Image (tube, helix red, strand yellow):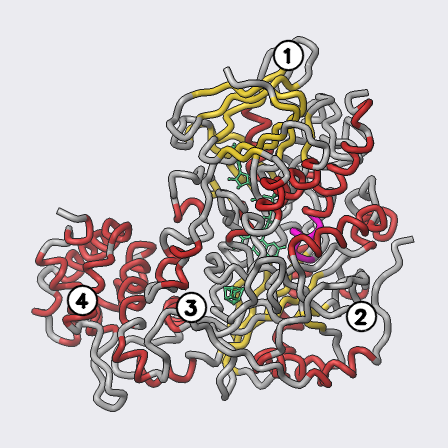
Amino acid sequence: MPEQESLTPRQRQDLRTIAAMMIPASSEYRVPGADDDAIQADILRTLGRDTGPVAEALDDLARLAGMPLADLDEAQREAVAKQFRSSGGAAAATLIRVVLQCYYRDDRVLRSLGLELRPPFPKGYTLEQGDWSLLDQVKAGPQKLRKAR
Amino acid sequence: MNDPVDVLIIGAGASGAAVAWSLAETRMHILCLEQGGWMKPAEYPSTGRDWEARFYGDYSPSPNIRARAEDYPINEDNSPIKVVNFNGVGGSTVMYTAHFPRLHPSDFRVRTLDGVADDWPIDYDTLAPFFAENDRMMGVSGLAGDPASPPTNPPMPPLPLGRSGVRLAKAMNKLGWHWWPSDTTVATTDYEGRARCINLGHCTPACAQGAKASTDITYWPAALRAGVELRTHCRVREILTDEHGMASGVVYYDKDGIEQFQPAHVVVVACNGIGTPRLLLNSVSGRFPNGLANSSGLVGKNLMFHPYAQLYGYVDEPTDSNRAPPTCLWSKEFYETDKSRGFVRGYAFQFGRGIGPVMEAVMSEAKGILPWGPDHHKVFRKLNGRRLGLAAICEDLPEEHNRVTLDPILKDSHGIPAPKVDYTIGENTAKMLEHGIARGREVLEAAGATDIFINCPILYGGWHLLGTARMGTDPERSVVNEWGRSHDVKNLFIVDGSVFVTSGGVNPTSTIQAIALYVADQMKRRLANLFD
Ligand SMILES: Cc1cc2nc3c(=O)[nH]c(=O)nc-3n(C[C@H](O)[C@H](O)[C@H](O)COP(=O)(O)OP(=O)(O)OC[C@H]3O[C@@H](n4cnc5c(N)ncnc54)[C@H](O)[C@@H]3O)c2cc1C
Ligand code: SF4
C-alpha cells in the first residue's frame, strides 16, 4: 500500500473535521472548505513524508476529543481545537501546513484570489521597472564607504 | 586503486567550482569529488503546481528536513539558528537567493579600526581582481556607482525595482537613508548561454529557468570543457597523510557505496563552513590526533552565521509578491561602525518583495494572525500579496565557543560521524539585532505598512557558514596561511567560507568565490615551490 494512504479511516474522518474548522466553505468568496472532497483527496495523495507527523497529530487530537471530533458539540470542538493548536507542537504544525498547502493550490481557491491556475514555470511573470529617478537622492548624497586605512 | 591525480578538490559548490575552473588552465589532472549529483532543472519545484509545498519537503533548505540520500544530518539542537545548505553539483548555490554584495574594505581590518576580533592577513585590494573575474563568470546584474559599497562593474543591468522596490525606495528617501538596487547573480539579460530571468519568483529552491547563477550552470560547464573531472555521489570520509605529514589522498564512498582510496598530490577542501571542519576532524591519525590541520585547535571554532532580524508588514496595495526574484534592494546605512549606537561593526538591510499564497498562509497561521473559521477568508485576502519585508543581516564576531565538533552518536548514511553545532548569539550582535529591528520598523512604517511582525533570529537562517578554519599568518591562531594553505600540511588547501577571519555584514558568496580564485591564483604562481 502506498505511504500516503496509511491514515486510518478514523484519522481521515478527524482530518476532514479539523480541516473544515480551519477553513470553512464561503459562498461570499465562492470557495470550498478545506474539507472538500477534492482537497481532502489531494492531501491524502500527496501526504508522503508528512504521513508520520500528521498521523501523530491526529492521534493527539483523538486523545483530546475522546471521540470522533465531529461527534462533539461545537463548543467542545472549539475547545479541543484551541488546545490542539496551542500544545500540538511540530506534529500539529505539520498537519496545519499540509491542509493549507493543498487548499491554497486548489483551482477554485486560486480563482477566487485572482491568481492564475498554473505553476510559475515556464510562463513566468512581468516585473515593472519602477521609477529609477528615485535613486537621484541617493546619488546626490555623501560617499559612505569607510576607508580601511 | 585509482590512479593518482595532481589536484583533488572535495566539494563542487560555490568555491570548489571556482577553484576547479581556475586551476584547469594548468593542464594538471584535476579531480573533484562531490557527495551529491547533477541537478535536473526540469524537476525543480517551480515547474509544478505543488511548487510551494516542496519547500517544506524535498526542496527544504534544511538538510535535516530535506534528508535526501546526498545530505548528511547535523545536530543543531544547541543553536538558535539552524543550518541550511544544499549538497550536489553547485552546492548551496543551487538554493541560494543570489544576493551578491562584496565584503567592504573595512571588513578586512576590524582589529585596527574597531579593536575587535582580528584583521585578515589579506585586504580588499588583493581580492579586487578576483571579485571582478567572479562577477563575470557568475554573471552579475546590478548598477555601478553605489556610494556606500565598493566599486563594481556588473555586466548586466539591475533587476527592475518593481512595486515593492518603489515603495521601499520611497520610504528610504523619506528617512534620508542609503539604498541601492542589489547586485544579484540573477541574469537580467541572456548571458553566456543562460536565459534571462522571467520572474518565477521561486529562486531559493532552485531556478528552473537557469537565470540564477548556481555553479552547476556557470563554472562547472567551463571547468569540464577545460578538462577537469567531476565524480558525483562520492562522499569523502577522511583525508589520509603519509609518513612526511603530507596529504596522500582521500578515502571516499563511491556511488555504489564502495570504499575507495584516491591518491592525490594536492588536496583542496571546499565543503563549506560545516562540511570542512567535519572532514578535518574526521581525518584523525597518530600524527594528527586532534584532526588534520588542527595544531592550533581552531578547526571548527569561531563559527559565524550572520544572525538575521527579519521584519515584515502589510500594505494596502499588491506588492510584487512571489512574481519576482526575492532580491530587490540593499541598504548600507548602518554598515560601518558608529559607536554611538552601542555596538561596533554593523549590518546591511536586505529588502524583499513578498511571498506566495501557501507560505503566506502557513507563516501567518503560525504567527496567530490568520484565524481559523469564517473570518479566515477575509483576513487572508488582506494579507495575501501585500507583504513587504526586509532583514538586517548582522555581522557576527568570531567567538571560539561557537563551534562545529563531531557528534558522538549521530552518523550519516555511510556511518561517518555527523557534525554538531554549538552556537549562541554574541552580545555585540544582539545589540545590533535590536538596532536593526528598531530601524527596520521605521522603514516599514514609512512605507505605510501595518501589522509589523518580527522573526529574530530567523530560525532556518544558518545559510552563511563561516570562520571554522580561519586564515592567518600565526600558526597558533589560524588554520591556513594567507594564501589558503594549511600551516600543518603543506599540500592541503582550504578555499570555502571556513577561512573567513571575520564575517562582515553582507552575504558572503561573492567573497568566498573571490578567495577561491585568489588561492587558485597563488597556487598557479607558486607551482614550482608550492610545498616550501
Ligand atoms: C537558502 C539559502 C540562501 C542563500 N542565499 C544567499 C545569498 O543570497 N547570497 C549569498 O551570498 N549566499 C547565500 N547563501 C549561501 C551560499 O549558498 C554559500 O555561501 C555558498 O554556497 C558557500 O560556498 P561553499 O563553496 O563554501 O560551500 P557549498 O556551496 O555549500 O558547497 C559545498 C559542497 O561540498 C560538498 N561536500 C561537503 N562535504 C563533502 C564530503 N565529505 N564529500 C564530498 N562532498 C562534500 C557538498 O555536497 C556541497 O556540494 C544561501 C544559502 C542557502 C542554503
Ligand atoms: S525569479 Fe528569475 S532567477 Fe528566480 S527562479 Fe525565477 S527565473 Fe529564476
Q: Are marks 3 and 2 in contact (CB under 8 Å)?
A: no
Along the horizontal axis of the image, is B119 left or right of A90?
Answer: right
The amino acid type found where label 2 is placed reads Gly
> Residue B145 shows which numbered tag?
2
Q: Nearer the viewer, mark 4 or mark 2?
A: 2
Element at badge 4?
Answer: helix
Cα distance in 3D space between marks 1 and 3:
53 Å
Note whether ligand 1 is within 8 Å of mark 1. Answer: no
Q: Is residue B402 visible?
A: no
In the rendered image, the residue lying farthest to the right is: A149
> Would you name the residue on which mark 3 appears?
A122
Provide the secondary structure element on which disc 3 rests.
loop
Q: Earlier in the sequence, mark 3 or mark 4?
A: 4
**Disc 4: which chain?**
A
The label shown at residue B242 is 1
Identify the magenta region: B506-512
Q: B70 or B452, which is in the foreground? A: B70
- Mark 1 or mark 4, whichever is nearer to me: 1
- Asked which secondary structure carries label 1, the reply is loop
Residue A105 at x, y = what percent?
Answer: 30, 71
Q: How many marks?
A: 4
Which residue is more in the foreground, B57 or A88? B57
Badge 1 amino acid: Asp
Is disc 4 surrounded by few (<14), some (14 to 19) or many (20+) residues within 10 Å?
some
Residue B448 quadrant: bottom right
